[in-house]
């Protein structure tokens, strides 16, 4: 799943507001992003491309 940063306050040295990031894991109300070892609050992001597993394949979800 991809997310877009909508709030980089207090994280400007790490996150870019408007930047898109790949989510590696989701735990404790945080996203663990590809390329980062720590979690970031989900409140800082909006989902760009949710994915759904269909028959063993991943497909973009449509709203």
Image (cartoon, helix red, strand yellow):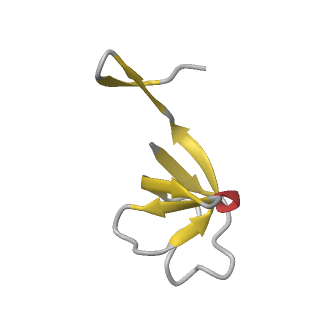
Query: In which quadrant is the C terminus drawn?
Result: top right
Q: Position of residue 18 (x, y in %)?
A: 56, 58
Q: Nearer the viewer, residue 20 or 56?
A: 56
Q: Nearer the viewer, residue 59 or 53?
A: 53
Q: Position of residue 45 (x, y in %)?
A: 62, 55
Residue name at image x 52 percent, y 84 percent = 13
Count of picture labels: 0
| Extreme residue toward the top, this view | 55
| Extreme residue toward the left, this view | 56
Residue name at image x 49 percent, y 78 percent = 14
Relative horizontal placement of residue 60, taking residue 56 as reference (left or right)? right
Q: Position of residue 30 (x, y in %)?
A: 59, 61
Q: Position of residue 2 (x, y in %)?
A: 46, 46
Query: In which quadrant is the N terminus drawn?
Result: top left
Residue name at image x 40 percent, y 72 percent = 36
Name above or below for residue 14 compared with residue 1. below
Residue name at image x 58 percent, y 80 percent = 12
């Amino acid at each position: 799943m991809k997310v877009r940063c909508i709030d980089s306050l207090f994280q400007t040295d790490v996150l870019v507001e408007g930047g898109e990031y790949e989510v590696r894991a989701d735990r404790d109300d945080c996203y663990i992003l590809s390329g980062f070892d720590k979690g970031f609050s989900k409140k800082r992001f909006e989902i760009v491309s949710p994915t759904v597993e269909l028959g063993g394949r991943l497909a973009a979800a449509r709203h």
